[in-house]
Image (cartoon, rainbow, N blue to C red):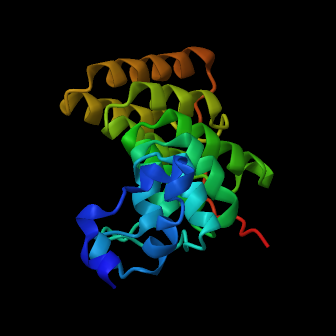
Amino acid sequence: SSDLSRKEEMPPPSVARDAEYRGVFTVIVRADAAVFAASPPAAAAGAGDLISVQALRVAGADPARRDSKGRTALAAAVAAGHAGVVELLVPEQGESLAGLLQLACAAGHTGVMDGLLKVADRNPDGVGVDWPELLQAASSGGHLPAVRMLSDRMPESAAAEPLRRQLAQAARAAGHGAVADFLEDEVRRQLASGTPRALVPPADPVTLPVSA
């Protein structure tokens, strides 16, 4: 239609907060993805535009539709660190919790990590959380707050002293001195307590619940 051919004249998703532009989302939802270069829900979620994400849902947009990077709206919000959008979308999409957690840890988004770990907490014994993998993702990125959060929340059996030494060495080699110092302090604490922790086997993946 002429509306779609004049992409530059269309208001961006953020104008959803103005009532007179809400009708534009019906046009966007029906448009071919190539016109907008991305899934509209993923674009709004990746920008952290909570109001637009809500408006797109009302207009019938599919949050599972993937953008040009292969991401759903939920994955785009996780990657960008928008905890509020993640909280809105988590109940509606059946995605791998393990994959989303690793994405959040690798980026150091502690707010998103906290929300996803609370979802994991609702599963018995933290099933679906591969703590060593998450710790490696956070430490390799040099994200000290994320490493601290994981260390505080993981079960006592979830990370062995040898693993922490390896991660500390890798972090130091990558120039993440603060992360290396923290992990080495954790090793010393474990040795002093006399209760070195062993690795737990990889957890079975958990899929986020899909709303009815």
Residue 43 screen position, x and y as percent: 39, 59
Q: Residue 131 or 60: which is nearer the viewer?
A: 60
| Quadrant including the C terminus | bottom right
Which residue lies at the image location 62% right of the left edge and 59% below the top edge? Answer: 203
Q: Is residue 129 above or below residue 185?
A: below
Q: Is residue 64 above or below residue 163?
A: below
- To which quarter of the image does residue 39 belong? bottom left
Q: Is residue 97 above or below residue 3?
A: above
Looking at the image, residue 123 sits to the left or right of residue 113; the answer is right
Which residue lies at the image location 49% right of the left edge and 57% below the top edge? Answer: 21
Which residue lies at the image location 37% right of the left edge and 70% below the top edge? Answer: 67
Residue 81 screen position, x and y as percent: 45, 42
Residue 24 screen position, x and y as percent: 47, 66
Q: Residue 164 or 68: which is nearer the viewer?
A: 68
Q: Residue 67 or 3: which is nearer the viewer?
A: 3
Does residue 64 show up?
Answer: yes
Which residue lies at the image location 54% right of the left edge and 68% below the top edge? Answer: 63
Residue 190 screen position, x and y as percent: 55, 22
Disc tally is 0
Q: Is residue 174 above or below residue 192?
A: below
Q: Residue 49 or 162: which is nearer the viewer?
A: 49
| Quadrant including the N terminus | bottom left
